[in-house]
Amino acid sequence: MLAMVLDAPGHPLAARELPVPEPGAGEVLVRVSACGVCRTDLHLVDGELPEPRLPVVPGHEITGTVERLGAGVSGLSPGDRVGVPWLGSTCGACAPCRKGRENLCDRPLFTGYTRDGGFAEWAVADARYCLPLPGGYDDVGAAPLLCAGLIGHRAYRMAGADALRLGIYGFGAAAHIVAQIAVAEGREVFAFTRPGDAAAQGLATRLGCAWAGGSDEPPPVPLDAALIFAPVGALVPVALRAVAKGGTVVCGGIHMSDIPAFPYRLLWEERVLRSVANLTRQDGLDLLAAAARQRIHTETTVYPLAEANRALDDLRSGRLVGAAVLRIR
């Protein structure tokens, strides 16, 4: 099979012919149709994530079809359409797992990071962590839901049900999905992009945001909550300044540049600053159900598998609007 392989951080992915992997006990072999290109993949390639398994095939927004079952697999059959997300496996025995917080597992495996992912024609996945894809989406359109959608939705729920005025900093793959959910639920959404990014601001407006502007601009009204998807630590005090008393700022990325010092008065008056880590399988089921129910549209730019490095470069430079997806088949 053709696969795009990371041999060392800081180097481009290498196109390789590899053997089709065999599913072990509890695993399935997935014939990959599409795989989203996530900012986490970019952090991996650029060496900003610690201790990846090398060499590794990146990619954790996998959509495809179950081809073969490993020993002991139940609940899936050959031909089933599935999505494979970032959280690839958990131990089930550590304290977070026992408390129902598998996203904080002490011994997890992550798709495309500590186990091979979907920048390839075939992938092996833990059957327990494969999600059924909703109808109404082709495989390219469903791919961004598997991480941008999942993490974005988890961050959105952390903002609280009473956050009627919601700011979103960094209007990319996650934001354009979350914004549609928030608008459908009757919230006002305020989109903050790179200064001067007219394309992203136009997308935000088309998706129903009440206001769109640069991250260097204040919102027209105080916000109840803000989600930060851009990996820019300097946006934390900016967002805290934008939220009203008792407001919440949620950092939705796995990596962010250092947060600069800021005066305590920005946090005072019961403002909350928190992060989101990984996802749970229930997060996946909830988001996919919401996407199907609300007919969430994913804005995608499609690349062939062999051009994964170009997709990463476009993401790195900010040339993308919406989400990048590799079409495998």
Image: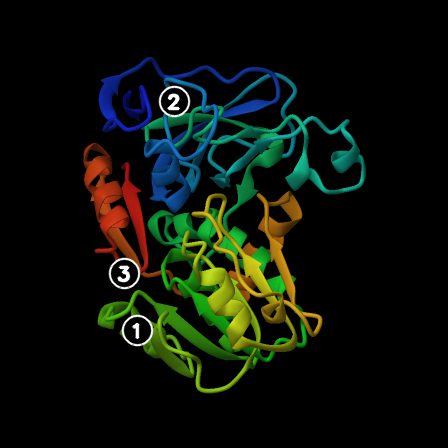
Relative to 177, residue 163 above or below: below
Q: Which residue is mark 2?
A: 56
Amino acid at circle 3 = Val
Identify the image quadrant of the C terminus. top left
Q: Which residue is mark 3?
A: 321
Mark 2 vs 3, N-terminal side: 2
Q: CA distance from mark 2 to mark 3?
A: 27 Å
- Disc marking residue 162: none
- Which residue appears at 25% of the width and 27% of the height? 13
Relative to 290, residue 72 above or below: above
- Disc marking residue 201: 1
Q: Position of residue 264 (x, y in %)?
A: 62, 65
Q: Position of residue 196 (x, y in %)?
A: 23, 71
Q: Residues within 10 Å of mark 1 (few under 14, many from 20)?
A: many
Mark 1 vs 3, N-terminal side: 1
Q: Residues within 10 Å of mark 2 (few under 14, many from 20)?
A: many
Q: Residues within 10 Å of mark 3 (few under 14, many from 20)?
A: many
